[in-house]
Image (cartoon, rainbow, N blue to C red):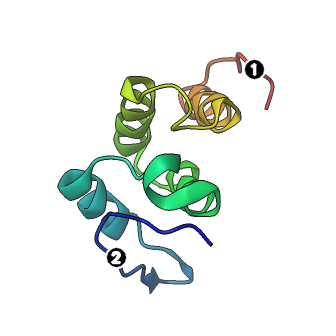
Amino acid sequence: MRTSNCAPVRWTRRRGSPSIHVLREAVAREDWPGRSRVGEDGATAVWLLAPHSPDLAFQKEVLALWRSQPPGEVDPAHAASLYDRICIREGRPQRYGT
């Protein structure tokens, strides 16, 4: 089991879906929880929240954060998937076909 040097974040559920508000607060406080901070499983779990946000602006913020992370912190497939989701929401064709 990997350990993390970041403060634990309590994830809550509202209306049956993960709380994007909690993720937004955690990112504002601690930056994006990449692989080196929360391990592969933690990074994947946190990634699953971003594409399901109803807030397009937040999705774009997350994508910009991912692009600013050092290599290896964010799975490129996750970034491609979020990019394509943003394209769909904006009525543009997908780039990566995810």
Which residue sits furthest right?
97
Residue 34 visible (yes or no): no
**Label 1 sits on what residue type?**
Tyr
Residue under label 2: 8
- Dot 2 or dot 1, earlier in sequence: 2
Between 25 and 8, the one nearer to me in the picture:
8
Q: Position of residue 76 (x, y in %)?
A: 65, 29
Q: Secondary structure at mark 1?
A: loop
**Label 2 sits on what residue type?**
Pro
- Which residue is at 32% across, 66% downward? 21
Residue under label 1: 96
- Which residue is at 60% across, 24% downward? 91
Q: Position of residue 82 (x, y in %)?
A: 59, 36
In the image: residue 72, left or right of residue 7? right
Which dot, 2 or 1, sits closer to the camera? 2
Q: Residue 43: which quarter of the image? A: bottom right
Residue 57 visible (yes or no): yes
Q: Residues within 10 Å of mark 1 (few under 14, many from 20)?
A: few
Q: Is residue 34 above or below residue 42?
A: above
Q: Is residue 97 above or below residue 66?
A: above
Q: Secondary structure at mark 2?
A: loop
- Which residue is at 48% across, 60% downward? 38
